[in-house]
Amino acid sequence: MDLTYTPQEEEFRARLREWLGKILPSLPPKPSPDDWPARRAYDLGWQRTLYDAGYAHVHWDASPTVRLIFLEETEKAGAPYVGAGFVGLLHAGPTIAAEGTAEQRDRWLPPVLRGEEVWCQGFSEPDAGSDLAALRTRAWRDGDDYVVSGSKIWTSHAEVADWCELLVRTDPAAPKHKGITWLAMPMAAPGVTVRPLRTLAGSAEFAEVFLDEVRVPVENRVGDENDGWRVTMVTLSFERGTAFVGEVVACRRVLGELAHEARRNGRWDDPALRRRLGLLNAEFRALWRLTQWNVSEAEAGGGLPGVGGSVFKLRYSQARQELYEAAADVLGDEALDLDRPWALDRLSSLSYTIAAGTSQIQRNIVAERILGLPKGR
């Protein structure tokens, strides 16, 4: 497997790095984490800046390797995170690009790239647990519309979203993986109620969404009716494949900062801590190589991430938690001060073995689709 970059890819890296060095000092200060309307405006403003500079295309129209370089360089430079654009740019958008009709791509992709519309993800449900296919939100045909009733939970950025990538059950009599449909639902539709959820870290980027006979046009269906599980696997392959690239780069930077802080406060003298940080360094170097391998596989497979994304997600989730547990050891008693660097990150890291598919689900995928083990009963 060739993990090297071509001269053209390195030229793209150099050009992007030069542009970031010029544009980042001119950006306005980031808004308060609790002010989501302001955060939406800031995040979309950055996306518009990328669009005007010719870099917005990398999420869909560029090769997976160019996308990897873009995510790596923007994170290294300290560029704004996609934030409120996360679902549109990294989940729903790539799915529509891969599975949508020409009309759907023309309608939904340009506004996301231009920083004009925000998407949220309506997948998880209160009673389904980690078994996404156990969803019970119903949709039935009524002329040219689907009528949708049910509820979703952990709906990312629902309070500021224009659209929702929504999974619904359109055939309750079919086996649970067969009766699901993928819809694009306008969040302004009558019958949609959003209630923000506050996390352990104090943030409110998730919400409960209640749907009371919401009408969604049939033309908003991506893929065929009852073929939504297959379309969802495309969505999740992006979520588990390349969506965490920037975070791996960030974790490697944090690791270096932890070593510096440990030297400053005297904890570097503890050989067990040094060994722990050394092992984490090896972990994240290996995860970065695995990311490159997955991207190479995606290049060979037509641009779609494969099941290797589940291997990455499984190990990255645990490594991230271990990183911030090590940060707590470096900080000592100061780890209880939420104003200290890494304290809130430690709390948010607890969600990573749940978000984007629980670690138990990832193990099942690895066992069945990579190792060829029989499915459990």
Image: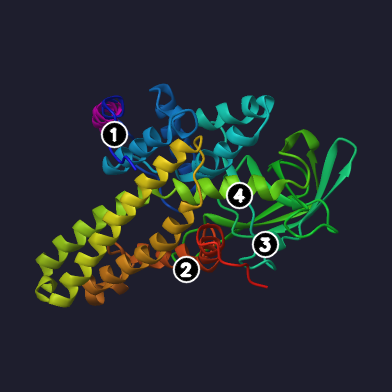
> From mark 3 to mark 1, how far is it between C-alphas?
42 Å
Within the image, what quadrant is residue 75 found in? top left
Q: Identify the main secondary structure in magenta.
A: helix
Quadrant assignment for the N terminus: top left
Mark 2 or 3: in front is 3
Mark 4 or 3: in front is 4
Residue that label 2 marks: 200
Considering only order in the chain, which callout, 1 or 3, is on the residue closer to the N terminus?
1
Q: Secondary structure at mark 3?
A: loop
Q: Secondary structure at mark 1?
A: loop
Residue 15: within the magenta?
yes
Q: Position of residue 128 (x, y in %)?
A: 68, 66
Q: Which residues are magenta?
A: 12-25
Considering only order in the chain, which callout, 1 or 2, is on the residue closer to the N terminus?
1
Residue at 15%, 67% (x, y): give it: 262
Observer-nearest residue: 342 or 170?
A: 170
Q: Determine the residue located farthest toward the right in the rendered image.
A: 143
Mark 2 or 1: in front is 1
Residue that label 1 marks: 5
> From mark 2 to mark 1, how far is it between C-alphas?
41 Å
Q: Which mark is residue 233?
A: 4
Q: Disc 2 residue type?
A: Leu
Considering only order in the chain, which callout, 3 or 4, is on the residue closer to the N terminus?
3
Q: Which mark is residue 327?
A: none
Q: Disc 4 residue type?
A: Met
Residue that label 3 marks: 125
In this rendering, the answer to whether 337 lies above or below 100 is below
Mark 3 closeness class: few <14, some 14–19, many ≥20 residues within 10 Å: many
